[in-house]
Image: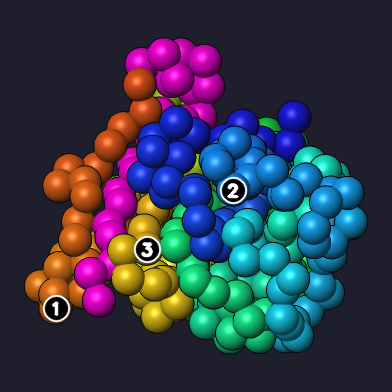
């Protein structure tokens, strides 16, 4: 399985896919997207949304972030992901729908993408932050603690941007310490940064990185420290916090009045960005917050999909 979508029922409840275009800004394997498209198809005007009816016969995946529109449908889904493996997987998963477009792009560029495609009205934007199961467990991608691979960690492997190993090698011990503390919330960031910095020329694979972290902390803290160090390096490598800020701001630019913004976060840094953004939108009179407190997955969902346990869902509606 490429990925198991998290809090699917709640996502659909808040997005209400009935009319207009929903933007799935973190398409992944297309799990949420598929259910959104099925909800469109099941709604009263939805009968034309399968291929063979109006619209495209095959989904189109753009190879860059400058698509040219316009779309030939007005009720459907725009799926965005910056990982070409995710794009390919979602393309297969959604191949029986014609009222959708898949774009290989960064969600930080949302307004340019939406305008380029001539998509409107945008009635919902979904963010499902972080990495998919497939990315997390694939050795060659460099996100996995348990399988050896290059220290890459780029979501977009086609982008000419530094890998996590490049960042490690070009950064000072102090910078590494700050990243592990700020983006990993790792209490032993100082000693871990020292060891990684000392060994930076000998590090080649995630296995080397795992051994370096393990040598810096007592064994009973190693697992948590590893998860935090990998998280911090992933956030840095992909400019995640900056992209989240730009993505949320872009969503507000493209959403029509009464359109809905739904965001799934998996750690407190992501959730803090969403919370602050929604609060600022409420204070400015632009957003009505629909979730005063973040929603959490049900115990049944956590039992069935333990990876969902850290999820927090927040949603808001555009007022003007
Ligand atoms: C948790 S997964 C989404 C899973 C998806 N909702 C599903 O049901 O299969 C997050 C996805 O967001 C993508 N992603 C992360 N940062 C991105 C960015 N800045 N722009 C576009 N996609 C991004 C990742 O490549 C990953 O595929």
Question: On residue 284, which mark appears?
Answer: 1
Q: Is residue 112 visible?
A: yes
Question: On residue 45, which mark appears?
Answer: 2
Q: Nearer the viewer, mark 3 or mark 2?
A: 2
User: Looking at the image, is mark 3 or mark 2 earlier in the sequence?
Assistant: 2
- Residue drawn at x 88%, y 49% is 52
Circles 3, 2 touching at the beta carbon (< 8 Å): no
**Where in the figure is residue 226, as x and y percent of width and height?**
51, 42
Helix or strand or loop: what does disc 2 sit on? Answer: loop
- Residue drawn at x 66%, y 85% is 116
Helix or strand or loop: what does disc 3 sit on? Answer: strand
Crowding near the residue tagged with mark 1, few <14, some 14–19, many ≥20 C-alpha atoms within 10 Å: few
Q: Which residue is mark 3?
A: 259
Location of residue 64 with respect to 89 vertically, above or below: below
**Where in the figure is residue 80, as x and y percent of width and height?**
65, 63
- Residue drawn at x 43%, y 20% is 302
Magenta extent: 299-320
- Residue drawn at x 24%, y 42% is 294
Q: Is residue 211 visible?
A: no
Instruction: State ligand 1's quadrant.
Output: bottom right
Q: CA distance from mark 1 to mark 2?
A: 35 Å
């Amino acid at each position: 399985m490429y990925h198991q979508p998290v809090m699917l029922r709640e996502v659909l409840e808040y997005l209400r896919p009935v009319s207009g275009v929903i933007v799935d800004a973190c398409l992944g394997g297309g799990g949420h997207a598929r259910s959104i498209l099925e909800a469109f198809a099941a709604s009263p005007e939805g009968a034309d949304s399968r291929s063979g009816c109006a619209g495209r016969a095959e989904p189109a995946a753009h190879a860059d972030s400058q698509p040219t529109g316009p779309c030939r449908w007005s009720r459907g889904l725009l799926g965005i992901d910056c990982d070409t493996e995710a794009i390919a997987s979602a393309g297969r998963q959604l191949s029986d729908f014609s009222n959708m477009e898949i774009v290989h792009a960064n969600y930080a560029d949302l307004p340019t993408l939406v305008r380029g495609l001539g998509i409107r009205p945008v009635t919902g934007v979904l963010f499902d932050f972080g990495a998919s199961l497939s990315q997390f467990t694939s050795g060659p991608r460099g996100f996995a603690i348990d399988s050896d691979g290059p220290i890459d960690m780029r979501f977009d492997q086609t982008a000419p941007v530094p890998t996590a190993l490049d960042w490690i090698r070009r950064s000072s011990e102090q910078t590494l310490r700050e990243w592990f503390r700020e983006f990993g919330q790792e209490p032993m960031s100082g000693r871990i940064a020292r060891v990684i910095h000392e060994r930076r020329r000998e590090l080649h694979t995630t296995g080397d990185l795992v051994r370096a972290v393990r040598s810096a902390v007592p064994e009973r803290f190693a697992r948590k420290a590893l998860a935090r160090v990998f998280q911090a390096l992933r956030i840095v490598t992909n400019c995640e916090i900056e992209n989240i800020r730009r993505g949320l701001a872009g969503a507000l630019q493209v959403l029509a009045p009464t359109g809905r913004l739904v965001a799934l976060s998996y750690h407190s840094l992501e959730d803090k960005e969403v919370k602050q953004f929604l609060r600022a939108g409420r204070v400015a009179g632009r957003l009505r917050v629909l979730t005063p407190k973040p929603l959490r997955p049900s115990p049944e969902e956590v039992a069935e999909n333990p990876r969902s346990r850290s999820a927090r869902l927040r949603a808001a509606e555009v007022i003007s």
